[in-house]
């Protein structure tokens, strides 16, 4: 029996509230909203935490620091991991640093790089990360995923936030540039023998990619 749209919406809302945020993530979310930065949703954050824990991540790289919401979620799931996070907004990263410190995360575990990810990523070591998380310019999503697959180790994860792009990817009438970019990315990955993929409807969509190969 097919689910009604009202049931789907109710399930989506339930999943967003299913796992509560701790005080440090709530603080970072509030700071994000005050600065006009859109953080990952509660459901996406909890999925990031579970994936970080399941993969026993030790090394994480993030494209799009924001004010630290996603970073806090991932480090919650991987308490022994180190996080490298790239963002071109120094002010946001200064707030994120404070959030990490307030959460008791050692400064040696978080490396914040201020700059354009397109310039920074080519300098990062390939096959060195357990998780690559992407939450940045949607127009560069394909380029960022290409970098992510280079940086991830074999069996590592590349995770992409907003992969349903405001719900527009599923709407065939939506033809804006960002929506078309995500559709192209999803189509290309679905046919690739080099990866395994799954698309979660949580939040605005979380694309999950496992890098295969030696």
Image (cartoon, rainbow, N blue to C red):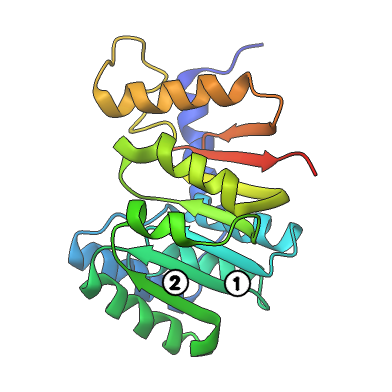
Q: Which residue is mark 2?
A: 25
Tell which of 126 and 201 is nearer to you: 126
Give the answer, above or below, for where 86 lies relative to 8.
below
| Residue 49 pos. (x, y %) | 61, 61
Residue at left offset 65%, top offset 32% = 197
Contact between labelled residues 2 and 1, with CB atoms less than 8 Å apart: yes
Residue at left offset 38%, top offset 60% = 120
Q: Quadrant of the N terminus?
A: top right
Look at discs 1 and 2 and give the one toward the viewer. Answer: 1
Q: Earlier in the sequence, mark 1 or mark 2?
A: 2
Tell which of 102 and 155 is nearer to you: 155
| Residue 105 pos. (x, y %) | 53, 86
Which class describes the residues within 10 Å of circle 2: few (<14), some (14-19), or many (20+)? many
Q: Quadrant of residue 94?
A: bottom left
Image-based side of 115 in relation to 57, left or right: left
Which class describes the residues within 10 Å of circle 1: few (<14), some (14-19), or many (20+)? many
| Residue 74 pos. (x, y %) | 57, 65
Q: Which residue is mark 1?
A: 76
Q: Quadrant of the C terminus?
A: top right
Q: Quadrant of residue 58?
A: bottom right
Image-based side of 46 in relation to 36, left or right: right
């Amino acid at each position: 029996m097919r689910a009604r749209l009202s049931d789907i919406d109710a399930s989506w809302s339930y999943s967003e509230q299913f796992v509560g945020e701790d005080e440090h993530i709530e603080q970072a979310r509030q700071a994000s909203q005050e600065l006009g930065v859109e953080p990952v949703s509660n459901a996406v954050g909890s999925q990031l935490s579970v994936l970080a824990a399941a993969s026993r991540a030790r090394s994480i790289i993030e494209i799009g620091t924001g004010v630290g919401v996603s970073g806090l979620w991932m480090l919650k799931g991987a308490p022994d991991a180190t996080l490298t996070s790239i963002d071109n907004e120094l002010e946001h990263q200064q707030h994120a640093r404070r959030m990490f410190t307030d959460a008791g995360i050692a400064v040696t575990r978080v490396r914040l790089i201020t700059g354009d990810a397109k310039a920074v990523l080519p300098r990062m070591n390939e096959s060195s990360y357990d998780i690559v998380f992407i939450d940045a310019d949607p127009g560069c999503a394909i380029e960022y995923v290409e970098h992510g697959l280079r940086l991830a180790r074999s069996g590592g994860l590349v995770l992409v936030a907003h992969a349903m792009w405001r719900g527009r990817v599923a709407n065939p009438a939506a033809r804006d540039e960002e929506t078309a970019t995500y559709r192209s990315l999803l189509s290309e990955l679905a046919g690739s023998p080099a990866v395994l993929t799954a698309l979660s409807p949580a939040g605005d969509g979380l694309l999950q990619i496992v890098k295969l190969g030696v």
